[in-house]
Amino acid sequence: MLRSRMTVGLVAAAAVMLAGCSSSNGATAQSPEGSPVTPTPTTAPAAPAVAHGVEAAIGSVPWAKVGQGWMLALWNPITPTMPGAPPAPNEPAREVATTTLYLVDPQGNRYPITTFAPETDPRVVDWSGDGGHALIKTEKYEPGASSSPLVSIDLHTGAQTTLPITGYAQYTRPDGDALLIATDNDRDKPGTLKRVDLAGNEQQSYPTDQLGGAGHFSGGYLQSHDSTQLVLGTANVEADGYTKSDNSLVVMGNDGKIIRTLPSPLAKAECDPVRWWTPTVILANCDSARGSQLWKMPVDGGTPTALTAVNSGQGDDPGFSGDYGDGVAYELPSGTFLQSAGACGTLHLSRLTPDMHTTNVHVPGVSDSIELVGATGDKLVLLAKVGCSGTTSLLTYDPAANTSTVLFGPPINGGGVTEARLYPDQKS
């Protein structure tokens, strides 16, 4: 599933809640599954450390070193504030503030790649498996302009190429020499999935109508890193909008032939493939009338394993206090960590408890509103949010030591890091 679609879904679910815009309970992080509780160190710093990286020109990128732990980040000189709050002094107006795409290494050294015009709101959609290209989606506000164009960026040169494509796009794995384009389903017709070259010419259209009897393609999918398999979600929605039957996941070969179906592990649920948990197991988010639940599902048809308990999404379930739903999870040596939806559009970092529930994680010196970008080694990559508003700083967090380090954004250079994406995982 595309990261941007998942995050938007979390925010939308949280926005309907009537509680306050930001949580600040400062809950102490609990231990990982099955291990004794380890108290938070009493010497934890009051604020994150700051990386002493430097900014260098695009021609200085050490491409032989670019790999795991590197990040793409979009930075804008405007620092986000809570809704209704005045802007910071001496900030540029939105209509003149440009956004810059940076390549950032694990030490915080950063390299500006290219710049986007004011009010285009670029978002990082994907990063090619060879590390050389980024896919950016922008918004155009000028009358008559095409909406939401896709732009492919050559990270070696900064060159921008607008792609004549609509739909949810990802580079094909492993190298990014083509694109997969998906569209959502509706009640009357399935979503579509096709592969096109980088000029927009169709190479293959995948059969997404009944998917071997499993039903309509929902628009959500994962592709294996070696490109040999796809895992497609289904959405069998009745006329009244409710799901009255199970929605299997479908494993398909890159040639469009169905390999097998993976029955929904939660009754009458729609399961979206979220990310690869291991090279042979996916993490799926299953949503039913009872609530949502994360599952680990082997793509060879093995028995699924629940990662979380069922969360009703009300925010007051025992064990899910303040957690309106979990979108993604990452397993580190120090525990399993999740992106959880809070009230009023906020997001926060949670840790899985031994009983398959969650507890809020307080990152020292950072607001409880946090976006989980991903994991690298034994650390998490986070974006600090301003309540239910935008994001400010890009940082890493070491849960075992309970310490964090700002890599980019305030207090290093002000403004706000609006988006970030980790280098593509080569294990899945």
Image (cartoon, rainbow, N blue to C red):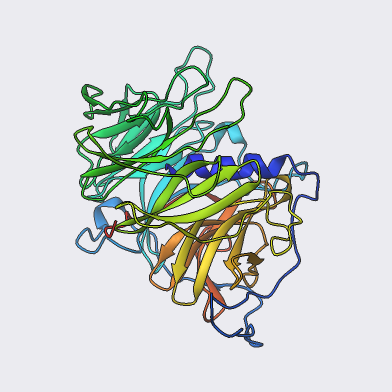
Q: Could you tell me residue 398's position as x and y percent?
A: 50, 74
Position of 36 relative to 293 (above/below): below
**Going 53% across and 81% down the picture, which residue do you hit?**
401
Position of 186 relative to 325 (above/below): above
Query: Please, which residue is most extreme toward the bottom here?
Result: 42
Q: Residue 221 appears in which quarter of the rendering?
A: top left
Left or right position of 172 against 209: left
Q: Residue 357 appears in which quarter of the rendering?
A: bottom right
- Work out whether residue 72 can be spotted: no
Left or right position of 175 against 21: left
Q: How many marks?
A: 0
Position of 348 relative to 80 (above/below): below
Query: Please, which residue is most extreme toward the right here?
Result: 19
The quadrant in which the C terminus is found is: bottom left
Nearer to us in this view, 163 or 376: 376
Left or right position of 207 against 185: left
